[in-house]
Image (cartoon, rainbow, N blue to C red):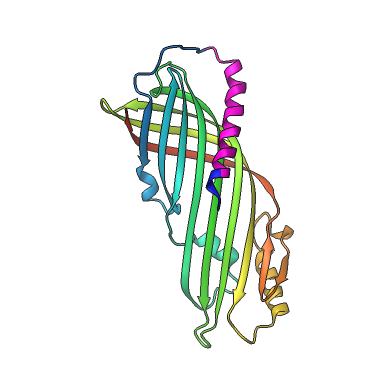
Amino acid sequence: MKVQPILLTLALCAFSASALLAQNNRWDYDDEPEQKWSVGLAPFSLLLPSGKFNVRGEWAYASNKSLSLLIGIPRPTKMPNLLENNFDLTGEGKTVKNRYSSFGAVLENRFYLGGKAPRGFYLAPYARYNHFSLARTTQDTENQYATTFKGAVNGIGIGGAMGFQFRLGDHITMDATIVGLDFKWMRGTLTYSTNNPNNDVSAFRDEVQAAVEDIPIIGSKLSAAIDGDKIKVHTPGAALPGYRFNLSVNYVF
């Protein structure tokens, strides 16, 4: 996964959206902010099975404007049960590998209505990128042959958020993104393989096809195809709504 092109795309999207909003912005302040920089950590992301933990940085480039970058660093965890049930072929056998992780980046251009960035109530257009990685291996208890499922899903989108940041001390703030709504273009690839030397690839494809057809919403649009000794399923691109909430503790300087 190439992160630099992704972040560049996010930057272009956020700057374009902010330029449009700035044309109608009536809160125009010329004073420099007292504290320009902040770095923070979202503690609740360590407690949730989200496959990542969030870190945040913010640069106040005017008294009422800032750029905020939230990065979700991958943190391997178990695949959620809902995903297991949707993508598993038979549900039988012993699970010997179960891994789920995600990477995310959100670039916001914040407009603080009180003119005291980075504190107070803010509105923010933003660009968002997500990458989800899934891997699960099930081993047959009778013959020890294993079947592996791997998946990768990517999404990029734009949206708007509102939130509030307040002081906890001279250099400590609490930032809460109360609500963020966006639309993302999502697309991915699913790959199934087995180490059974007697595997009938055509029969294996039919088994995969039967499994993916039961996936909610997009199952009827999925088609399994033989790719060497593996079976691949490319998910169709789809625009999906998204919601985000975030709470972080920050050091401001």
Question: Residue 209 in the image: x percent, y percent?
Answer: 70, 69
Instruction: Name which residue lies at 41% across and 35% down.
Output: 57
Establish if 208 lies above or below 164: below
- Would residue 16 be counted in the magenta stretch? yes
Question: Residue 64 in the image: x percent, y percent?
Answer: 45, 18
Instruction: Name which residue lies at 69% across and 50% down.
Output: 237
Report the predominant secondary structure element of the magenta stretch: helix
Question: Residue 156 in the image: x percent, y percent?
Answer: 60, 43
Give the total of numbered labels.
0
- Would residue 68 be counted in the magenta stretch? no
Which residues make up the magenta segment?
A: 5-26
Viewer-nearest residue: 131 or 175: 131
Viewer-nearest residue: 185 or 44: 185
Instruction: Name which residue lies at 61% across and 16% down.
Output: 23
Instruction: Name which residue lies at 64% across and 60% down.
Output: 189
Query: Left of 88 or right of it: where is 42?
Result: left
Establish if 87 lies above or below 188: below
Viewer-nearest residue: 85 or 248: 248
Establish if 162 lies above or below 82: above
